[in-house]
Amino acid sequence: MANKNSESDEPRSVDWHVTPNVSPDQALERLVAGNERFVRGEGTTRQVLRETLADLARGQRPFATILGCSDSRVPPELVFDAGPGELFVIRVAGNVFSPEVAGSLQYAGSHLHTPLFVVLGHEGCGAVAAAVETRDSGNQHESRIQLLVDNIAEGLPALDPRLELAERLSQAVESNVRWTVRQILETPEGQARLFEGRLRLVGAIYEIETGHVKFLT
């Protein structure tokens, strides 16, 4: 966790600029500190100065890439109290891995050189719940939704039917995040960057009721 007295946890000016080079660990500390501000209700005012827009027009240098769910309750920029140009965000229902997502992640790594990648799931994910329902009861969905659901169901482990539905869904959400992380790590690009020591990829779960982000180990 970030040190409460560290510079990364201090309130920031609203004058966001292009992010300088940071290490993967520093990037993670910035996300943790930003989420702590969000939970405390101390997020930075969402005002963008003209000078900031002019800087961003010349290019972007995000310090982290977030693959998150499309759920309207989980906006990464607010959850991590990040300003324009600080996060490269990819959002798709169920934070699933697909060829299109893979292309976006490859761009973030190869062209933007973000040092940190986060797969961000969340409590009560409807896409994950649909995957559990399909696997347990055989319920089918509309064609394209079913493709997404099948992608999630493929990575779900056996869940104890004696558990309450909420507990089973909680386990499924975490399993889905870990499944997406595993798929990313198994790509040729992921393997190459791991070998080079240039990739840090972590999973995380957003708690809807508290706003807290739990990073998985």
Image: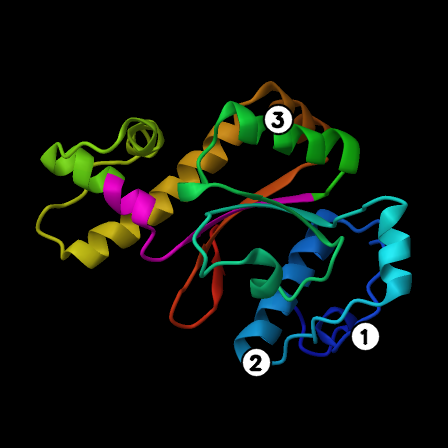
Query: Which region shows up in magenta?
Result: 116-130
Q: Return the residue at label 1.
A: 13
Q: CA distance from mark 2 to mark 1?
A: 16 Å
The quarter of the picture where the N terminus appears is bottom right
Task: Specify whether 58 is left or right of 148.
Answer: right
- In terms of image quadrants, where is residue 107? top right
What colour-coding does the image apply? rainbow
**Amino acid type at image mark 1:** Ser
With respect to residue 150, does 203 lie above or below?
Answer: below
Q: Amino acid at mark 3?
A: Gly
Q: Earlier in the sequence, mark 3 or mark 1?
A: 1
Check disc 2: other Cα within 10 Å, few if <14, some if 14-19, many if 20+.
few
Q: What residue appears at the point 53 percent right and 75 percent down from the top-left corner?
A: 39
Tag 2 secondary structure: loop
In this image, 140 relative to 195: left or right? left
Q: Are marks 2 and 1 in contact (CB under 8 Å)?
A: no
**Is residue 44 something that shows in the picture?**
yes
C-alpha gap between disc 3 and disc 2: 35 Å
Q: Where is mark 2, residue-wise?
A: 41
The image shows residue 7 at horizontal and vertical percentages of: 78, 72
Q: Earlier in the sequence, mark 2 or mark 1?
A: 1
Q: Residue furthest top?
A: 188
Magenta segment includes 122: yes
> Relative to the observer, which residue lies in front, 171 or 211?
211
Mark closer to the chain start, 3 or 2: 2
Of residues 158 and 54, which is closer to you in this image? 54
Question: In terms of image quadrants, where is residue 113?
Answer: top right
**Mark 3, residue position:** 103
Q: Circle 1 sits in a helix, a strand or a loop, which is it?
A: loop
User: Of the numbered discs in the image, which one, if any, rests on residue 187?
Assistant: none
Asked if residue 209 lies in the magenta stretch, the reply is no
